[in-house]
Amino acid sequence: MTPSYTLKIDEITSSIEPPSEAWRERARAHLDTLTKPLGSLGRLEEIAAQIVAIRAERFAEPMKKGVYIFAADHGVTAEGVSAYPRAVTQQMVLNFLAQGAAINVLARLHQAELCVVDVGVDADFGEISGLFHRKVANGTQNMLHEEAMTKAQVEQAMAVGYEVAHQAVAAGINMIAIGEMGIGNTTSASAITCALTGAVADIATGHGTGVSAEAYARKAAIVRAIGERHFGSTIYPLALDVLRCVGGLEIAAMTGMVLSAASHKLVIVVDGFISTAAAAIAVAMAPAARGYLIAGHQSEEPGHKLLLDYLGLTPVLSLNMRLGEGSGAVLAMPILESAIALYTQMATFTSAGVSGAS
């Protein structure tokens, strides 16, 4: 089924306003009145203030969480950039639907609604239930030899993310985790990282799903060749061109979801390398979207730190993970909920009759 939404990128990007600085300052002032030494909750205070700035007068509403996995295949897998065959994308989607993956366990444990979206898997899922059928194409083209997607495909895939964000809002979800599944997508994320940050391929490329040392060297050379082919000496190409030339259908969908979710003032918890690549493209298109992002964790992929630095995000967790699926983002959600619970439920010095510091 093709996307049912028409995407008007300029309208979405222009509709995004930064989180409220007035509410952020109000939150900081309130945090200083709570029964604790000033700043003693560390990062939790910063997180609470950011969530209050995002949610404004709705900050005290219970957090309803959702995690969204966008799945698609990549033509560049023909170059041997992954230790796993392309068929694993389809197989893992079936595993998600059968409740057997790590993200299923974490989503159940932390009460996050899970939605799996086929935006470009090279397989026919028929009418299988539990899957959001929004296939744009059966994967991208091989970006080593041609542009990964057409302009129309990029817009259609972004429209999928836009549609999913609207469904999340309609369901009352106000904190989202964005994840992905797609064999070969760390190569895409590495190429995006190089284009956005100016990093060289050897620094931005990691081992992905666990390729050998020889395969890793080839992967880095392929990422370098991809950049040279599409961007040459161009410094910091346009974000949409980066997405079209070296992105993936799932990355485009996540980009659309980030933009739409920011326009609806949702708390957006990004996962690892690939979802952060999508978030970085979204921020390049609409800088105000950055204020809605929280980095769930820092992946073992070296390019992830480059993107986090590019976005100015400090990860909540660092667990040496490199799984994807939205797993690190969902793991961070209870910490975010803890931050806002402390903010809303702790007594103040005045209400508790406790003497403040002199």
Image: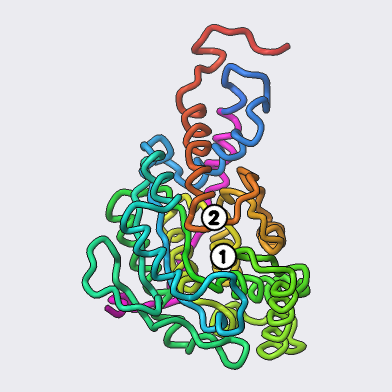
Q: Nearer the viewer, residue 144 or 113?
A: 144
The dot on residue 274 is 1
Picture layout, residue 190 above or below residue 53:
below
Picture layout, residue 314 above or below residue 302:
above
Please check the rendered image and state whether residue 349 is part of the magenta-colored stretch, yes or no. Answer: no
Residue 12 visible in the displayed image: no
Please check the rendered image and state whether residue 11 is part of the magenta-colored stretch, yes or no. Answer: yes
Q: Left or right: 208 with respect to 134?
A: right
Residue 156 visible in the displayed image: yes
What is the spatial separation of the Cα atoms under label 2 and label 1, in whole angstroms? 8 Å
- Residue type at mark 2 is Asp
Residue 2 appears at what percent x and percent y?
Answer: 30, 80
Query: In which quarter of the view is residue 350 placed?
Result: top right
Q: Residue at x 29, y 73 (%)?
A: 125
Tell me the SS state at disc 1.
Answer: helix
Q: Left or right: 126 with respect to 100?
A: left
Q: Residue at x 31, y 75 (%)?
A: 5
Residue 174 appears at what percent x and percent y?
Answer: 39, 48
Picture layout, residue 129 above or below residue 266:
below
Q: Are marks 2 and 1 in contact (CB under 8 Å)?
A: yes
Query: In which quarter of the view is residue 220 placed?
Result: bottom right
Q: Which residues are magenta?
A: 1-30
- For the C terminus, the image quarter is top right
Badge 2 is on which residue?
A: 271
Q: Residue at x 55, y 67 (%)?
A: 278
Q: Residue at x 51, y 29 (%)?
A: 343
Q: Nearer the viewer, residue 152 or 90?
A: 90
